[in-house]
Image (cartoon, rainbow, N blue to C red):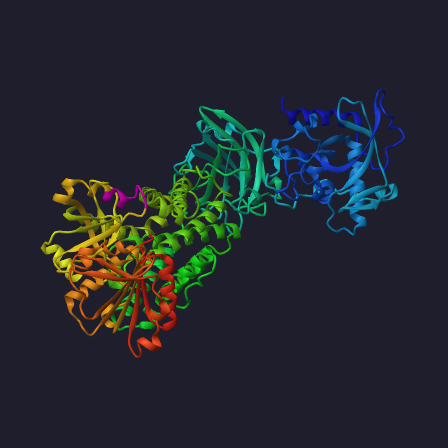
Amino acid sequence: MTSITRLRWIFAIALLVSGPASVQAQQPPACVPATGTKAVTITGYIMDNFCLEMGFMVDNPTMRPLEHPEIHSVHCLAELPPCVSSGYAVLQTKPKNSTNPTNYAFTAASTANATFEVAYFLDADGTTLAQRYALAAMAKLGGTKTTGFTATVTGYTDGKVPFLSCVTIANTVKANGSPLTVTAVDANAVILPTMASTAPVSSPSNPILVPGVASPCTEASMASVTAVPLGTGPMTIKTSVSGGMACIQIAIDASKNAKWFGISISHGATMVTTPQSNAVVFDTTQPTKLSFVTLGGYSASAIAPEASTSAVSFVASSTINGMASFTFSRAVATVASADVAIGAGPTNINWAYGASSNWPSIHDERGSSTVVFGSSAVLAAPDTHVTTYTTAIAAIALGIMIVLGLIATHTGHWRVINQATLFGPPASKLPAPIADVIESVADIKIGEYIVIGVYGACLAVVSASVRRQFAGEPNARLLRLLSGHLALVGLMFLLLPVARGQHWEWIFGISHERIIKFHRMLGRFVVVASTIHLILTLQVTRVDNKTVFGTQSVVPLFGFVAFVSFASMGLLAVPVVRRHCYELFYYHHRVASVVGVVFVMLHSRTACVAMIFPVAIYGLTFLLRLRAYLQSFRAHVQVHHAGTVVLTLPATSQTKRWASTIHPGAFFWLNVPSVSVLEWHPFSAIVTPDGESIAFCIKSLHAGSFVDRVLQASQDKSIMADGLSILVSAPYGHTAVDVPTYDEVILIAGGIGITPMLNLVNQARLLGDASKKIHLHWAVRHPDELLCADSLMFSSPFPDNVHAKFYASGAPEGGFILGSSEPVAYVSGRPVLDEILNHSTQYPSKRVCVLACGPPPLVLDAQRHARACGFDFHKEVFLF
């Protein structure tokens, strides 16, 4: 016998002993305490046993009665029939480690986090007396909402069964947190409500179970009726119509172990419709009852008991031949407020069942079917999918971006759009986190802000479109849809910046490493939006749900796998991981991105269509990049003791073509199979002084890094003699400034940051354009570092239009160091940018651009000075 059944027996015995409810304020004189009982006086909240047994407050379904009895209303306590007829209890504060056995007479949900416990139950007379005092208290408060009714109760108990009989109540009670005086006269003046006319008006999360009444149909009468499958699910339906009544039998495959199953005769194929529909649910733990509820939303709290409980009549339930079933009858016409009439034509039936948790709970599977009552015809299931315009809107936005990019790139200089920025770089003394944010914003050109504006407009239009298509939906579902669609828009654009190729240079005039910042921004946006989407989705389904769900035809499990993939990518993309554990970041990105994209396309039909274009673009560029495995060279190796290696490709028709056509700032992705078959890293290309090939000057920044392993491999004698086998991909890269259009080009370099600048210097050597002046300022720590690219830089004199000045910050004084052709002069200290970048004195009426590459403080300082002078600025970006 369950604890709830035992409680009902106790109530039954108490009612038999106590007799009918009294209408007087005090017990009649005939109430004499039984022999062996003792008087008990206790002050506490009065709570009805119905709310205690259900584990929630009917008037406030999100609250537990043993957690917050102070908010329990007198309306629920003393006016609703289920609450009054269940009897009352007096609560007390729950002591730590309480072993009070009355805790276990109720559902686990009602006691899980309880701060109160039942001290005593009141008998029938005591319940009626407490009801009168509660209603009298509400009357004294003017009939306003009254909560937390507390009374001092005296009664008699035998100490074995926790019931109080011969109950009296003190005149001082409490409601709404304030003491009130309620006399016996006040209590006697109360007119008790007629229970048959009172019905709950709340929306409890656990619908009231409606006991069955006499029915015109029987289970036996349905035995000869043909069962009609409800779609492709495990449920069937039998129907018959006689006069104005319909007899309905719902069955489910018993192997599903359903804890509940039910149907909704609905206005549409979605679970929640406007106007609302109701549902009949059979709880297998209550085999003689049905739940008759109104579906007001997709969460359990939006399920309310149907006011007209007599609209359906329970007939029977059984499990025969592997099928669990329940039978009920209802009128063909509408009786309850949310009824849908049963016509002679097709009727929409929504079905669902739950096997993981008790009713009410999220369904394990659901669907929609169309049936004709009284017929065995199987009709096509209605399509519940709602087609949205998110993909089309995003495609239009991308088209606008491309058109604007082509105009800005190919129809003039458009300096304001292509070069000007809205914000300056951060001050030198700002904290690092703040400085990083300001620096990121300062790097965005006005043209890029226009692209961001188009993207923002796209999000706004998508939001408006979703709101329009799903107008009338509850706010929680609308927000769930919005967050999902906005995350999808972000994901559509997320793949595009990492689709490496020269197409971005042709469209926008900049290469992919300069738009990778948008990839990071979009990645953060997708993670935030999808996190919100996940949290809201968990309110209506589970992440392990493998069935198609909702009007967007989503599979929650696949979406969750995609979320985990993308969220983990975002976690490992934080700068501290990306810059210090690049291989971990890179290879996790490679694997998780494939998993995420595949499962997000499986997650929903809309996502599958939306991702076709970005996946196709990325896939096409990936196939083109596979050519790199055919571009193998045996590079000549020179090792410098400062931890640098120069790799020079042999002169071929291919390398000569690269040398003559690559842009300033070009870079290649290199792979050294003898070091790692999988690792590819970007390095700036340097045109050789003779213009016959290209080379790479790379530096090891810490032990165990890719370059450090290349350095170690390069010291092998056979490699020094025969060369190092490498694979090269692309070229990529394009400076943010169009160097040939400027009169003066100022190059600021620090350390290994000389490599892109040296490429530009060597191109100037080959072009011989004396009208363009190039000013090179290169700072290193020690003088010998000036020779890290000796064969590429000092093998021949600089042309007349190239003015170079070298700095050694660690040298006590200036001097010379012997290069491959002549001594190289240097000065002690660092470049003084106030003197180098000064518009008024050095470069009047000339077009000037500044290019910088090196340690971040040096580059940032150069950016500040260039902006102050009004010079166009470009900096090399390799912190992918």
Residue furthest to the bottom in view is 845
Q: Which corner quadrant holds the N terminus?
A: top right
Q: Is residue 705 magenta?
A: yes
Q: Is residue 796 left or right of residue 814?
A: left
Q: Position of residue 231 (x, y in %)?
A: 40, 38
Using the image as rendered, state which of residue 220 and residue 413 is in the foreground.
413
Residue at the extreme right: 29
Instruction: Report whether 792 appears left or right of 399.
Output: left
Decide if residue 690 is on the left or right side of residue 812.
left
- Counting from the top left corner in percent of width and height, residue 780 is at 30, 57
Asked if residue 513 is positioned above or below residue 585 in the image, the reply reads below
Who is closer to the viewer here, 247 or 169?
A: 169
Between residue 332 and residue 92, name the one nearer to us.
92
Q: Residue furthest top?
A: 36
Residue 183 to residue 764: above or below: above
Where are the magenta residues, as a range?
702-711
Q: Position of residue 879 (x, y in %)?
A: 34, 53
Q: Quadrant of residue 504?
A: bottom left
Q: Tell me which residue sits at (65%, 30%) in the image.
A: 106
Q: Is residue 275 visible?
A: yes
Q: Quadrant of residue 424?
A: bottom left
Q: Looking at the picture, does residue 209 appear above or below residue 466?
A: above
Depth check: give the residue in front, 867 or 248. 867
* Residue 768 vertical position relative to residue 187 in the rendered view, above or below: below
**Image coords of residue 229 (percent x, y):** 41, 35
Where residue 441 sits, quadrant-wise, is bottom left
Verify whether residue 276 appears in magenta. Answer: no
- Residue 383 in sight here: no
